[in-house]
């Protein structure tokens, strides 16, 4: 998940994610600071083949909602609602060059209007305050905390679990 400020973004639209978006998603997650902020990332973020394979599996899963975030027509990130151990979860990634413009907040609002099943869970690293604010702004409440190994930091990290009921 990316960081957000209180600024208003340019025009933010969601469209179905496509295979042609994968190279942009890959470039976004190559940024070291972004990976550290997100914390829970791929073991080897430079393995483009593995990244592409994972995303092709995501795109093939008909039960999941996969959207590319466009800002003024350019790919700025993605938002995905998926099932994890019986629970619906939302995740998003905003390219670092787009941070601080309210894009994650607008994208989350849009996906929440599209995917209305509840409860819906979201997770952030304990110190990713901006992403926590994005979730809370849209009604997610802190439910729990877990400690998991975070590839993006190479250590165990506290992960906050948020839940949206309505």
Image (cartoon, rainbow, N blue to C red):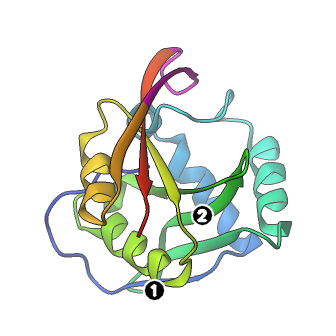
Identified at 32% across, 49% down, the residue is 131
Prevailing secondary structure class for the magenta stretch in the rendered image: strand
Report the span colored magenta. Answer: 145-155
In the image, residue 122 above or below residue 75: above
Q: Do the numbered discs 1 and 2 sit on residues whose CB atoms are within 8 Å?
A: no
Rounded to the nearest angstrom, the CA distance separating label 1 from label 2 is 19 Å
User: Would residue 114 be seen by someone viewing this image from the given angle?
Assistant: yes
Q: Which residue is mark 1?
A: 73
Identified at 75% across, 57% down, the residue is 55
In the image, residue 114 above or below residue 51: below
Residue 24: which numbered mark, if any? none
Residue 71 is covered by the magenta coloring: no
Quadrant position of residue 8: bottom left
Residue 141: x and y in percent read 32, 50
Residue 165: x and y in percent read 43, 63
Quadrant position of residue 143: top left
Q: Nearer the viewer, residue 53 or 30?
A: 53
Q: Which residue is mark 2?
A: 80
Is disc 2 surrounded by few (<14), some (14 to 19) or many (20+) residues within 10 Å?
Answer: many
């Amino acid at each position: 998940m990316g960081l957000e400020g209180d600024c208003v973004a340019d025009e933010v639209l969601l469209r179905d994610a496509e295979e042609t978006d994968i190279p942009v998603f890959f470039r976004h997650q190559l940024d070291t600071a972004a990976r550290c902020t997100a914390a829970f990332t791929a073991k080897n973020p430079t393995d483009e083949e593995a990244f592409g394979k994972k995303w092709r599996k995501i795109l093939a899963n008909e039960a999941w909602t996969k959207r590319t975030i466009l800002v003024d027509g350019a790919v700025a990130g993605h938002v995905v609602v998926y099932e994890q151990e019986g629970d619906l979860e939302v995740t998003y990634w905003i390219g670092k060059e787009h941070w601080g413009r309210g894009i994650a907040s607008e994208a989350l609002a849009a996906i929440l209007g599209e995917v209305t099943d509840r409860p819906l869970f979201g997770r952030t690293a304990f110190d990713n305050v901006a992403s926590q604010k994005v979730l809370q702004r849209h009604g997610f409440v802190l439910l729990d905390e877990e400690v998991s190994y975070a590839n993006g930091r190479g250590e165990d990290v506290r992960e906050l679990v948020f839940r949206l009921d309505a």
